[in-house]
Amino acid sequence: MCSLIYPIIAHWCWSTAGWLSAFRPDGNFVIGNNYLDFAGSGVVHMTGGFAALLMAYFIGPRKNRFTDSWKKVGS
């Protein structure tokens, strides 16, 4: 993730050629004034949070998580 995904997203936000960058020299912004990040924390946390969300979706819930099978063990 650190060598493939993060550099792409960081380029989008921080490079003057990035489509989300607020520092484009041509002033051709895609969305309003675009993305301005403070100390890089937004890009780092957005990337990690989105990756965690996707992995939670692909892995899915635990087996027997939403059943009452745990009640039968102690009875």
Image (cartoon, rainbow, N blue to C red):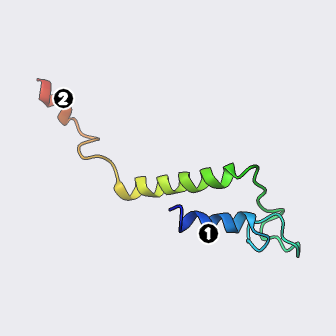
Provide the secondary structure element on which disc 2 rests.
helix
The percent position of residue 26, horizontal first and vertical second, equals 88, 76
The percent position of residue 48, horizontal first and vertical second, equals 54, 53
How many numbered marks have been drawn onto this rendered protein structure? 2
Q: Earlier in the sequence, mark 2 or mark 1?
A: 1
On screen, residue 25 above or below 51: below
Judge the density around disc 2: few (<14), some (14-19), many (≥20) Cα neighbours within 10 Å: few
Judge the density around disc 1: few (<14), some (14-19), many (≥20) Cα neighbours within 10 Å: few
Provide the secondary structure element on which disc 1 rests.
helix
Residue at 72% across / 63% down in the picture? Answer: 13
Near-viewer residue (33 or 67): 33
Residue at 23% across / 43% down in the picture? Answer: 64
Amino acid bearing label 2? Lys
CA separation, marks 2 and 1?
48 Å
The quarter of the picture where residue 68 lies is: top left
The percent position of residue 60, horizontal first and vertical second, equals 35, 53
Rendered-image quadrant of the C terminus: top left
Residue lying farthest to the front in this orientation: 3
Residue indicated by mark 1: 8
On screen, residue 8 above or below 35: below
Please name which of the two marks, 2 or 1, marks the residue nearer to the observer.
1
Amino acid bearing label 1? Ile
Near-viewer residue (20 or 31): 20
On screen, residue 23 above or below 49: below
Please tell me the numbered disc located at residue 74.
none
Q: Are marks 2 and 1 in contact (CB under 8 Å)?
A: no
Residue at 77% across / 74% down in the picture? Answer: 17
The percent position of residue 18, horizontal first and vertical second, equals 73, 71
Say left or right for 70 vs 1.
left
Residue indicated by mark 2: 71
Near-viewer residue (51 or 69): 51
